[in-house]
Image (spheres, grey):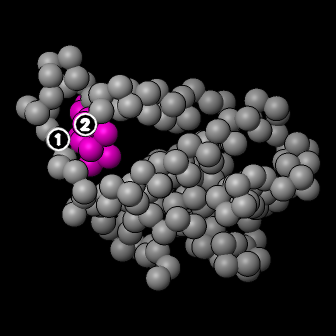
Amino acid sequence: MARLPYLDKDDLKDEDKDLLARNINLHRLLAHSPGAARSFGELGKYIRYGTTMDARLRELAILQVGWLAKSPYEWSHHVKIGKDFGVTDDDIRALIAESGGANSGLPDLDRLVLRAAREITIDGAVAADSFAALEGHMSKEHLVDLTVTIAFYNAVVRFLGTMEMDVEDSYQPYLDAFPLPD
């Protein structure tokens, strides 16, 4: 059970009802602070729709953060969203294998993106050798966007964990299909 109540449109001022255009628990809880919700939403929109970085790679990076954080909410939502952007069940299984140190069989760039997400999440920064390897595959713009994406979703999973966000019933099948580690 979340630490704060989930708000509905009826709980909000007229000028803030748009915050629940997407009626998911994350937005329903963020709506307690309309300013934070709007700022959060703007960066989230840029990451999803504004960046020119490959969408599948973006989603793999986000999924890696969700997996490492053992965040049921983030993981379940981005398993679904990832599929909308080209992530396959085999990709998800490979990410899980890669997270455990196994050879995933993923292409080099996919593995580098996952490694960068692991390093930022665990160590706080991408290691020099990993960054140099990424520079061989990505533009400077995409390197910045990848780093912003990973950093943002590290903040998201910490918010979700602190607020004890509940997974909506419609996302539970994604969590059931790919359960998080204990």
Residue 75 picture location, percent across and down: 45, 61
Q: Residue at x 33, y 55 (%)?
A: 163
Q: Which residue is mark 2?
A: 32
Q: Amino acid at mark 2?
A: His
- Is residue 53 depicted above or below 133 in this figure? above
Q: Residue at x 17, y 49 (%)?
A: 5
Front residue (pair 116, 6): 6
Q: Which residues are magenta?
A: 20-32
Q: Secondary structure at mark 2?
A: loop
Q: Is residue 48 left or right of residue 27?
A: right
| Mark 1 crowdedness (10 Å alpha carbons): few <14, some 14-19, many ≥20 | some
Front residue (pair 40, 4): 4
Which disc, if any, is residue 7?
A: 1
Q: Amino acid at mark 1?
A: Leu
| Tag 1–tag 2 contact (CB < 8 Å) | yes
Say if residue 33 shows up in the picture. Answer: yes
Q: Is residue 36 left or right of residue 14?
A: right
